Amino acid sequence: MAQASQASTSTATGRSAEPFELKSASLSLLALVLRSADRAELESQLQHKLGPTPDAFHHDPLLIDLGSLPPASGDDGQLSLDGGARIDLAWLLPLLRAHRLQPVGVVGANEAELAQALSLGLAEAPDLGLPARSAEPRTVVQEVVKEVVREVVVEREVPVAAEAPRTVVVDKPLRSGQQVYAKGADLVVLALVSHGAEVIADGHIHVYAPLRGKAIAGARGNTEARIFAASLEAELIAIAGIYRTTENPLPEHVLGKAAQVRLDGEKLVMEALNP
């Protein structure tokens, strides 16, 4: 009887309802480029840099870039070039999650590291082509907060004719946990961006209200992008991958005032609009 009833329902509707649907999707990520595999150093520097600002990240998806790690050392202390794992991801993942970062994939991994990553539930991400940095030594502190937000696209992109710049307008307040991404466009927000909310744009960001959450302009590497706010109170600001968190308080001449943020080389410059 049950089978007859099911067949009758399918015939009446013409087809049975699909239980799921697979679609291509995009995701904006933070990328953590590791240049050291020293456990003590990573624990110390992550705590030093992110410990004072526990609310800077809200379980944001994170891509772990292992491409800049030096070769692994063998038991004799000599560098090993045989593809051995350079870092143990089993202890690194809980460390990152403790700072409210959610690792979802790896890039630049060798065979041994990729095997461990897959066993821990991480995905292998495509090479994002992160822009080259200067050859001078950098600490993990800088890399944690100065990495590029890139878009990982599942489908293959097809070249199309250039379009006029677009603008995405949001006229409602953004609450904690909400995110708006203006892909290939400027973003204009006419209401409050609360703590824990996130606004991202490939172009400029204009917030005609208090900006208290995260603002990421030039998300795909546009160094000419700027951030404008009627009241700059952001917990995190970034342009083309150059970051500043609340660990470094905003200067008094822009805090809570109408201001703009722009890049000068690799330095974020903040200027009051009505000095």
Image (tube, grey):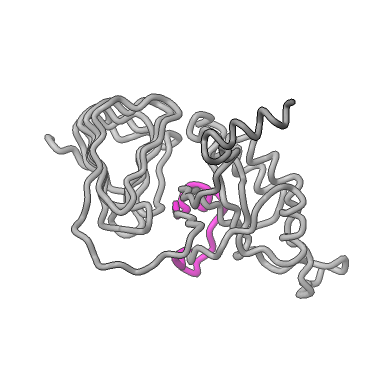
Going by the image, does 30 lie left or right of 197?
right
Query: Is residue 141 magenta-colored?
Result: yes
- Residue 25's spot in the image, x, y percent? 48, 49
- Residue 274's spot in the image, x, y percent? 12, 35
Going by the image, does 228 lie left or right of 65?
left
As drawn, the residue found furthest toward the right would be 75
Return the residue nearer the eye: 68 or 104. Answer: 104
Can residue 254 be seen here? no
Q: Is residue 112 above or below residue 38?
A: below
Residue at the (30%, 30%) spot, across then down = 211
- Residue 197's spot in the image, x, y percent? 40, 31
Going by the image, does 186 lie left or right of 38?
left
Residue at the (46%, 68%) spot, across then down = 132
Return the residue nearer the eye: 192 or 167. Answer: 167
Q: Which residues are magenta?
A: 130-150
By secondary structure, the bulk of the magenta-drawn segment is best described as loop
Q: Is residue 177 above or below residue 76?
A: above
Q: Is residue 191 above or below residue 107?
A: above
Query: Is residue 144 magenta-colored?
Result: yes
Residue at the (22%, 46%) spot, across then down = 167
Can residue 33 be seen here? yes
